Amino acid sequence: MKNNVSADDLIVLLAVVRAGGFRAAARLLGLAPSYVSTTISRIEARLGVPILRRTTRSVHLTDAGQMLVDRVGPLLSAVDAACNEVAATKGELQGRLKLNVPGAVMPDILPPLLAVYRARHPRVEIEIVVESNLIDIVAAGCDAGIRYGSVLAKDMISMPIGPRRQQLALAASPAYLETRGMPRVPEDLTSHDAIRYRLDAGPLLPWELSSGGESVRVEPINALVLSVGALDTGLNFARTGLGVIYTFRTWLDDDLATGKLVPVMPDWWPDMEGPYLYYPSRFAPPPLRAFIDICRSAAGKWALSSSGPLPVEH
């Protein structure tokens, strides 16, 4: 009995897994949902085993389905990359660049890099998945991810992207400080209202300060807790006088310059290591290689800045 499954059918299966359902995969592929469902049934009939568990809300891979996706996913990606590479020999890169990134890099680190990328490679579609948790970028269908150094997977190639050092800062509105007073030492913050961020996995991002070799973690009053996915929206609440905010210093520059926000305890603002671009060592398709080249060319400019973004030449 033959159990051959066509490459076209396998592409549909991978789309279902990556999109999380039949209808979403159908929209992605431009097919009818009924055709997608029929394709999955055909694969299961030819292999003689179920590959998906279906519920009214979602689909999940069976063990056999997971084995199939793990084996054919990289192969089909390699075929797609080979086709894109051949097409690129005409002088114009094509395909897709999909990045998995934390919200922290969205306002200032990625925009200048992607502006250069689009100017050089206008036929490459860029997709950004904003996610705070460290995930399996290969299983998620992403070409690369961006994360901070302490959480990088050991089996990945990584390179710096953005400033090598970033500074975290405290600030509040003049109206808030006029009412509540200016904190002078870390202990003062324990009686102040704070705008905090919570990671997707549950814990709050800590307030860790440092000065003269001394480090201290403080627990202020949580006036407002935001999802870390809304990292750059907290400034709007700080401007209204809701409380003290602890965020990237570069994000505060404009507000500090105009007086909308006032620096709080600048002698205690800590530095942290900047983010890294990471990707699987076994596979770097042409759109990703082109992005890596742009990041490398920008590395020298970023190195000149300890905490802020610099323009990247086209």
Image (cartoon, rainbow, N blue to C red):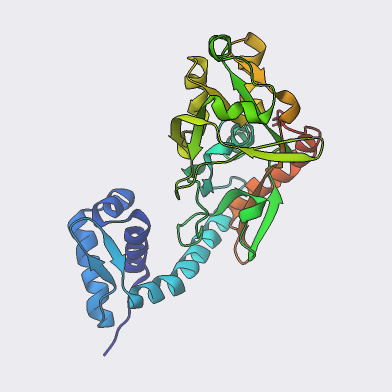
Q: Position of residue 235 (x, y in %)?
A: 52, 23
Give the vertical position of 197 relative to 42 (above or below).
above
Q: How many numbered marks have been drawn onto this rendered protein structure? A: 0
Query: Residue shown at 31%/73% (left/top)?
Result: 62
Residue 89 in view in this figure:
no
- Tell me: 208 left or right of 49: right
Examine the image and state in which quarter residue 208 appears. top right
Give the vertical position of 139 relative to 268 (above or below).
below
- Tell me: 233 left or right of 35: right
Q: Residue furthest bottom?
A: 1
Seen from the viewer's position, the closer of residues 314 and 226 is 226
Seen from the viewer's position, the closer of residues 22 and 130 is 130
Examine the image and state in which quarter residue 10 appears. bottom left
Q: Position of residue 16 (x, y in %)?
A: 32, 59
Residue 39 in view in this figure:
yes
- Quadrant housing the C terminus: top right
Seen from the viewer's position, the closer of residues 55 and 269 is 269
Q: Position of residue 210 (x, y in %)?
A: 73, 36
- Tell me: 246 left or right of 197: right
- Quadrant housing the N terminus: bottom left
Query: Residue shown at 63%/66% (left/top)?
Result: 155
Give the vertical position of 205 relative to 180 (above or below).
below
Give the vertical position of 133 relative to 243 (above or below).
below
Q: Position of residue 190 (x, y in %)?
A: 57, 30
